[in-house]
Structure formats: C-alpha cells, structure tokens
Image: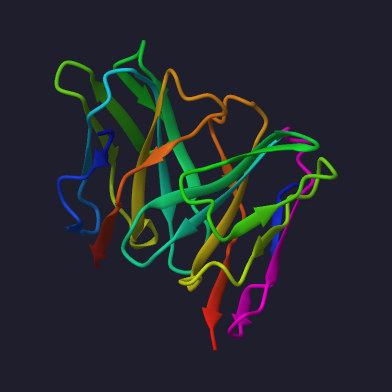
Amino acid sequence: DGGITQSPKYLFRKEGQNVTLSCEQNLNHDAMYWYRQDPGQGLRLIYYSQIVNDFQKGDIAEGYSVSREKKESFPLTVTSAQKNPTAFYLCASSISRAGEKLFFGSGTQLSVL
Amino acid sequence: GESVGLHLPTLSVQEGDNSIINCAYSNSASDYFIWYKQESGKGPQFIIDIRSNMDKRQGQRVTVLLNKTVKHLSLQIAATQPGDSAVYFCAEKPRYNQGGKLIFGQGTELSVKP
C-alpha cells in the first residue's frame, strides 16, 4: 500500500536531548512537510521540502532541523533549543510542489519527561 | 494579518441530519481551499478541495461551497453518521505562497448523536 509512515507513534524527550522523528513516503511525491499541532489548535508549518537536498523554513522553524537526502525520507530533529516541544507532529507529502492536497501520516506524539 | 477561522468551534448534530461546517477566510488572494477530517490521535484525511474559479464542488455525501464575495467556505455533510464525528479543518492557499504553504484554521469538532 502506498502511504506515509511516521515513527515512532509516541516519543519522550529528556531535558537537553535531541530527538529525531522519522517520516517515509512511497508515493513518489516531490514535496514533503512537517507540521506541529497543539491541543485545540490548527496546524503550523515547521519546515518543507519541494525537492531532494533542498528545504525551507516554515512559520515556526526555531529549535528544529530537517534533512532531505532521499526523495522518500524527510526526518525532523527536535533540538534542545526547542523549549516547548510537547506536541503532535504531522508529516505530509504532496505530488505537486505547489503544495495542494497534502497527504498526512498518522503523527508522532512527543512529550517531555 | 492572514487568518482562516471557523465560526463555531463545536457542532452537535443528530444522526441522519445534514451538517454544515463554516469557515471564514480573510485573504482575497487565496485561490485554493481544502477540507480535512481528523479523528482523535490520527493524521488529517483529505475530504474535498475547491479552486477559486468554482463556487461549488460535490463529493460522496459532501459538498463544499465557496462564496468569494464574503470570503466564506462551508462543508456540507449529508445524512451525518457517527463515523463522521471528528475535527474538521479548512485551509487556504494564497496565490503568492511559494511552496504551497497552506494556512489552516483552528478546526471545528463535529459530534454526532445517535
């Protein structure tokens, strides 16, 4: 089945620790995105990538980093500089670089110990 | 500034009734709109989308209406079922947004009573 796979489903971070969230897609989509969702709020864009080896900051990129070495993969690292990392993280992809009709993964819930 | 908002944060309907979820947008430069359904603990699922050159688009049991005059978007769900209970998000894409930066609204929680 084609789709977007995020792992792990749940992740815990200790103070001062960097953690990496995985996102893999086998849809052959060019564009990939990371969103953050806080309870009762909409989605906010962290980073996006329209093509391999290129990515741009979204609206809330501070404290996060990404890489796009392969078309299928777009991992997100939540660094220790992100002081409020507890949130639901969603990865998405789109066949169009215009970013319409995003397909989302099932999300990763990150919590701080 | 730009914003996409919903008139009602919660909506409760009886099973079998029609549901209407509303969304106001402020950016007249937006040329693409999309609705997503999100169940608890899951990622958003695409429902339906519409471009600004259309006023109405229908899918299976769903209809999206776009009123550009008053910058209003609505999602109509016919014969609402318990499985429709979820949070519904609208999103817009301003024409000038490179890379497809969708702007999401806060969401409306739909609760279907049996």
Q: Is residue A7 visible?
A: no
Residue B91 placement (x, y as % from top left):
38, 37
Q: Which residues are magenta?
A: A7-30
| Quadrant of the rendered image containing residue B95 | top left
Marks counted in the figure total 0
Residue B25 placement (x, y as % from top left):
24, 32
Q: Is residue B43 magenta?
A: no
- Colour scheme employed for the rendering of this structure: rainbow
Q: Is residue A5 above or below residue B114?
A: above
Quadrant into which the N terminus of chain B falls: top left
Q: Is residue A26 magenta?
A: yes
Q: Is residue A95 above or below residue A9?
A: above
Q: Is residue A89 visible?
A: yes
| Residue at 62% from the left image edge and 55% from the top image edge | A105
Q: Closer to the camera, A99 or A78?
A: A78
| Quadrant of the rendered image containing residue B78 | top left
Q: Locate residue A55 relative to residue B112 in the image: left or right.
A: right
Residue B48 placement (x, y as % from top left):
44, 34
Residue A60 placement (x, y as % from top left):
47, 51
Quadrant into which the C terminus of chain B falls: bottom left
Q: Locate residue B49 relative to residue A76 in the image: left or right.
A: left
| Residue at 51% from the left image edge and 70% from the top image edge | A85
| Residue at 22% from the left image edge and 29% from the top image edge | B26
